[in-house]
Image: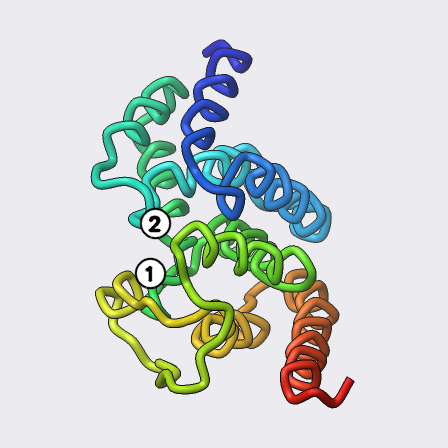
């Protein structure tokens, strides 16, 4: 496989997405994964990296089929058992409204934590409003009902405000981290988001 050609094809796939899921998101989750991998030397780092490079190509928010994902996986020329593992990791990353795929595979756990870290902290806040803006969502809406429990279909069709998304998903992620390093990294980012929401509430109420 030609790595340069593969990477160029991956970057092209993400070029059509908004700023919340573009290739800079991929670069950050890869960086998160490298940090976690330093504490998990027994993991297959190559599989983790390939999965994270491809994990949003067929994201249901943007794609209606897995055709492009399949083409990119074919470019890797993996052995059948490795391709099966790769597909499992990719499938296990997604939150799916809290209906994520169960996994005991270390590589999937690392990839999931790496991706979820990018939904937390300052970057997570920026991505939330970038996605909400791209979809025409309100910043906040005091009349809406927060959906704390959802099916995957409800999660996919939910049109609540960006602030609601913090309570429907983002603030849950800290307690869903799996790897020790991922849990550690999530703590500060989670606290920052809570601080941001408190600041936002005070500004909305004219207290600051």
Q: Earlier in the sequence, mark 2 or mark 1?
A: 2
Mark 2 element type: helix
> Contact (CB < 8 A) between labels 2 and 1?
yes
Residue drawn at point x = 66 percent, y = 48 percent: 32
Q: Nearer the viewer, residue 168 or 48?
A: 168
Does 171 appear above or below 131? Answer: below
Residue drawn at point x = 35 percent, y = 63 percent: 100
User: Which residue is the site of mark 1?
Assistant: 101
Q: Quadrant of residue 63?
A: top left
Mark sitting on residue 91? 2
Coordinates of residue 25 in the picture (x, y in percent): 57, 43
In the picture provided, is 121 more to the left or to the right than 144? right
Q: Quadrant of the N terminus?
A: top left
Residue drawn at point x = 30 percent, y = 68 percent: 158
Does 93 appear above or below 179? Answer: above
Residue drawn at point x = 49 percent, y = 33 percent: 50
Mark 1 element type: loop
């Amino acid at each position: 496989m030609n790595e340069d050609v593969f990477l160029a094809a991956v970057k092209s796939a993400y070029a059509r997405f908004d700023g919340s899921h573009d290739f800079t998101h991929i670069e950050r989750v890869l960086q998160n994964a490298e940090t976690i991998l330093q504490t998990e030397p027994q993991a297959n780092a190559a599989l983790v990296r390939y999965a994270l490079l491809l994990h949003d190509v067929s994201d249901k928010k943007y794609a209606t089929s897995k055709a492009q994902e399949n083409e990119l996986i074919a470019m890797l020329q993996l052995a059948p058992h490795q391709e099966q593992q790769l597909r499992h990791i990719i499938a296990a990353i997604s939150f799916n409204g809290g209906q994520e795929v169960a996994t005991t595979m270390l590589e999937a756990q690392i990839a999931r934590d790496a991706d979820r870290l990018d939904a937390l902290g300052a970057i997570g806040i920026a991505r939330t409003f970038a996605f909400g803006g791209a979809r025409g969502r309100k910043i906040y809406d005091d009349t809406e009902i927060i959906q704390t429990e959802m099916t995957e279909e409800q999660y996919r069709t939910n049109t609540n405000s960006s602030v609601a998304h913090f309570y429907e998903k983002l603030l849950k992620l800290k307690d869903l981290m799996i790897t020790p390093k991922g849990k550690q990294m999530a703590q500060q980012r989670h606290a920052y988001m809570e601080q941001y929401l408190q600041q936002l509430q005070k500004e909305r109420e004219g207290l600051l």
